[in-house]
Image (tube, helix red, strand yellow):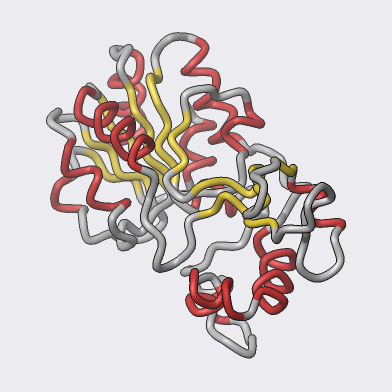
Amino acid sequence: MDEIKKLKEWIDGSDNIVFFGGAGVSTESNIPDFRSVDGLYNQEYDYPPETILSHSFYMSNPEEFYRFYKNKMLILDAKPNAAHLKLAEWERQGKLKAIVTQNIDGLHQAAGSRNVYELHGSVHRNYCQKCGKFFGPEYIAASEGVPVCDSCGGRIKPDVVLYEEGLDNDTIEGAVLAINRADVLIIGGTSLVVYPAAGLIDYYRGNKLVLINRSTTPRDKMANLIINDSIGKVFSQI
C-alpha cells in the first residue's frame, strides 16, 4: 500500500514526530467512543452524556454523575494496544517528541510513553475538593455513591475536564509548542470536531500532516497524507 510506504518513509526520516490522538486510539482497547455509531451518545440514560459530564451537573447531581462515570468512564482493566505500544517505541528511539491526546484513560503512559499532553485530564488523578488529597482510580471505583475523602470527608473530583470547564493552560501551551515545532504531525483516531482541542493542529507549520481515521474529517483538505483505516492496524504495519 503506497500510503503506508510513504508514512514509513516519513517516520524513518524524522526525529521530530508529534502524535495527536482521539477516542479512536482507545476503542481498540475496548474503551467506548462517545461519538461513534455504537458509542455512549447512542445509549439510553436519564440525561444525555453531555449533560451528565458537565460541571453544573456534577455540582448539582453528583450521585447520578458518579453512577455514569464509574459505569462508563472508569475502565481500569483496559490494556494498551498496537498504536500505544508503537508510539512508546518511537519515543524510546528518540523519534517521537510528544503525544497530544484527547483521551483520559492513561493508556499512553501504561504503554511507556512519558511526554504526554492530556488535553482532557485523566481518570488516574482524583483530588479532594476540600483538602486536595490525591486518590487513585481504584479508590473511586470501590467507593459507594459519591466518593469522599478518607481524611476530611470532602467530595473527590476526577481530574477530568468536564463540559463548561476550561482546558489546563500549561497543557495547552506544551501541546501547541510541540505541534508548532514538529516535522511530522500524525493525527489519528479523532473526528476533529471537538474544540478547542481540534484547533490545536492549526499551529502545525510543516508539510507532513498525516490523517489516520476510519472516516473522513473536516480537516482532510489540510492533510498531506490520508489513510482511512484503524490506527492500530496502520501502526502494526510500520
From what the image shows, is residue 68 above or below residue 137? below
Which residue is pictured at 72% across the width and 58% down the height? Answer: 154
Percent coordinates x, y for residue 223 in the rendering: 19, 43
Q: Nearer the viewer, residue 68 or 229?
A: 68
Q: Nearer the viewer, residue 206 or 175?
A: 175
Quarter of the figure with the N terminus: top left
Q: Would you say 222 lies left or right of 227 here?
A: left
Query: How many tags in the picture?
Result: 0
Q: Quadrant of residue 202?
A: top left
Which residue is pictured at 27% across the width and 45% down the height? Answer: 226
Percent coordinates x, y for residue 35 in the rendering: 47, 69
Q: Quadrant of residue 10?
A: top left
Which residue is pictured at 68% across the width and 51% down the height? Answer: 128
From what the image shows, is residue 13 above or below residue 236? above
Percent coordinates x, y for residue 116 in the rendering: 47, 31
Q: Would you say 122 lies left or right of 179 here?
A: right
From what the image shows, is residue 18 above or below residue 144? above
Q: Nearer the viewer, residue 48 or 36?
A: 48
Q: Nearer the viewer, residue 109 or 9?
A: 109
Which residue is pictured at 81% across the width and 70% down the height? Answer: 145
